[in-house]
Amino acid sequence: MQKLSLDARAVELLERATASATGRSADTVHGGQGAVLRQTLLALTTGNSLAEHESPGEATLQVLRGRVRLSSGDDSWDGRAGDLLPVPQARHGLEALEDSAVLLTVAKLG
């Protein structure tokens, strides 16, 4: 088992996101292809987003830094550092309201 500092990794990914034309960066920190549980650290700079997409399974977003808006249809939920947001099973998107890092945890169904 190897220990990982999510805080240090979030700083690195935010630096990469700032340098990227897309304003985002991501790294799978646990699990991966074929695993039931996958955790991905995502960094987004202010105003950048992940376009609306389907959920690959049951999921949560833990906001590590900044503020984000999770939206699905006409509904939206704002999260800030320390918040845990359940990801809707419907199509949804994510927007950074300020430079942000989140931990996406997905348990693939079936």
Image: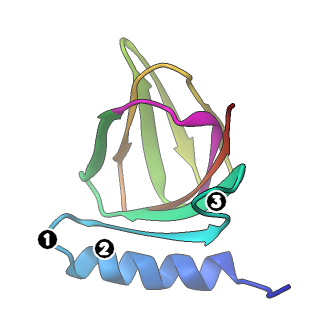
Q: Residues within 10 Å of mark 3 (few under 14, many from 20)?
A: some
Disc 3 vs disc 1: which is toward the camera?
3
Q: Is residue 87 above or below residue 21?
A: above
- Amino acid tagged 2: Ala
User: Residue at coordinates 40% horizontally, 76% vertically from top-left?
Assistant: 14
**Which residue is more in the foreground, 38 or 13?**
38
Verify whether residue 106 appears in magenta: no
Q: Is residue 12 left or right of residue 110?
A: left
Distance between the alpha carbons at the discs numbered 2 and 3: 18 Å
Element under disc 3:
strand
Front tag of 2 and 3: 3
Where does the magenta region start and end? 53-64
Residue under pointer 3? 39
Which tag, 3 or 1, sits closer to the chain's start?
1
Q: Is residue 21 left or right of residue 18?
A: left
Between discs 2 and 3, the one toward the N terminus: 2
Quadrant of the snapshot with the N terminus: bottom right
Q: Tell me what residue is drawn at x 63 percent, y 78 percent.
A: 7
Q: Quick one: label 1, few (<14), some, or many (20+) residues within 10 Å?
A: few
Query: Please, what secondary structure does the residue beneath circle 1 have?
Result: loop
At label 3, the amino acid type is: Gln
Measured from the top left, where is residue 31 in percent x and y? 67, 64
Quick one: SS at disc 2?
A: helix
Label 1 belongs to which residue? 21
Q: Which residue is mark 2?
A: 17
- Gap between marks 3 and 1 measured at Cα: 24 Å
